[in-house]
Image (cartoon, rainbow, N blue to C red):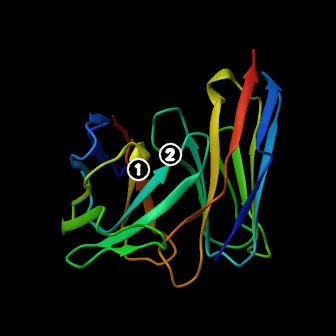
């Protein structure tokens, strides 16, 4: 089946720093989604990408759909304490409505 | 925006009893709903996909007789954990896919999850 490699697994950064995380897939995806999950809550959609090469921003967040359709990255600029949480990438392949999730990136922001 | 309501948020039950978790799409019709299980510090694991009016499709290794899924309407899907045991304790999350009518924009909205503890 499809596999997603998400890295890094965890990050400790100083408040104000920029953050970058990425996901790579063993197969082509038609959709890439980035979610943030707070403890005890469900994932909340941050950015959705639907076309290869697409670059989309949501406030301080920017994500790109890789041109090979096998990777995506998420950048967070000028991190703040409330950015703390677990970030998941998710992809949807052709012919399926199911999402495949990465293992998550745990972000810690040091004030 | 699309909202998915999941409840209960927390439930504690005795071993051997059954627990029902509800997932409702509040402002859209969801032809497809997904049920996930998440262990501590791990990613979401898809358990099953349910389509309104038809039987759910379970992922390999998920016992369909233990995790009963019903998707009787376009806005409601339920997951019943039958004869629960301590190893069923976990965080269960539902997701609803909005049928926007475009293949390029399938919206996925998640519920807030249910923490199940079996004692």
Q: Position of residue A45 (x, y in %)?
A: 52, 49
Out of A75 and B92, give the one closest to the viewer: B92
Q: Is residue B33 left or right of residue A21?
A: left
Q: Quadrant of residue B97?
A: bottom left
Mark 1 in CB contact with mark 2 (< 8 angstroms): yes
The furthest residue to the top: A111
The numbered dot on residue A43 is 2
Chain ID at mark 2? A
Q: Position of residue B63 (x, y in %)?
A: 37, 67
Badge 1 density bin: few <14, some 14–19, many ≥20, Cα 10 Å: many
**Real-space Cα separation, disc 1 to disc 2, in angstroms:** 9 Å
Q: Element under label 1?
A: strand
The residue shown at (71%, 73%) is A52
The residue shown at (64%, 44%) is A87
User: Which residue in the protein does label 1 denote?
Assistant: B93
Q: Element under label 2?
A: loop
Chain ID at mark 1? B
Out of B110 and A53, give the one closest to the viewer: B110
Whether residue B61 is visible here, answered yes or no, is yes
Q: Is residue A66 above or below residue A62?
A: below
Q: Is residue A87 left or right of residue B47?
A: right
**Which quadrant of the figure contains the C terminus of chain B?**
top left
Whether residue B73 is visible here, answered yes or no, is no
Q: Is residue B23 left or right of residue A102?
A: left
The residue shown at (25%, 37%) is B14
């Amino acid at each position: 089946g499809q596999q997603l490699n998400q890295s890094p697994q965890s990050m400790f950064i100083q408040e104000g720093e920029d953050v970058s995380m990425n996901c790579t897939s063993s197969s082509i995806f038609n959709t890439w989604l980035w979610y943030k999950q707070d403890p005890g809550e469900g994932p909340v959609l941050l950015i959705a990408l639907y076309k290869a090469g697409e670059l989309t921003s949501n406030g301080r967040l920017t994500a790109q759909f890789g041109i090979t359709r096998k990777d995506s990255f998420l950048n967070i600029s000028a991190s703040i304490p409330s950015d703390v949480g677990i970030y998941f990438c998710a992809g949807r392949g052709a012919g399926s409505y199911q999402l495949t999730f990465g293992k998550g990136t745990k972000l810690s922001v040091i004030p | 925006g699309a909202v998915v309501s999941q409840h209960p948020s927390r439930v504690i039950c005795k071993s051997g009893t059954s627990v029902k978790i509800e997932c409702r799409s509040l402002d859209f019709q969801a032809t497809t709903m997904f049920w996930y299980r998440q262990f501590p510090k791990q990613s979401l694991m898809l358990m099953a996909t349910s389509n309104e009016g038809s039987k759910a499709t379970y992922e390999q290794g998920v016992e369909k007789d233990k995790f009963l899924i019903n998707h009787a309407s376009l806005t409601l899907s339920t997951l019943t954990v039958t004869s629960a045991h301590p190893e069923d304790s976990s965080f269960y999350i539902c997701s609803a896919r909005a049928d926007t009518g475009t293949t390029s924009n399938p919206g996925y909205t998640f519920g807030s999850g249910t923490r199940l503890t079996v004692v």
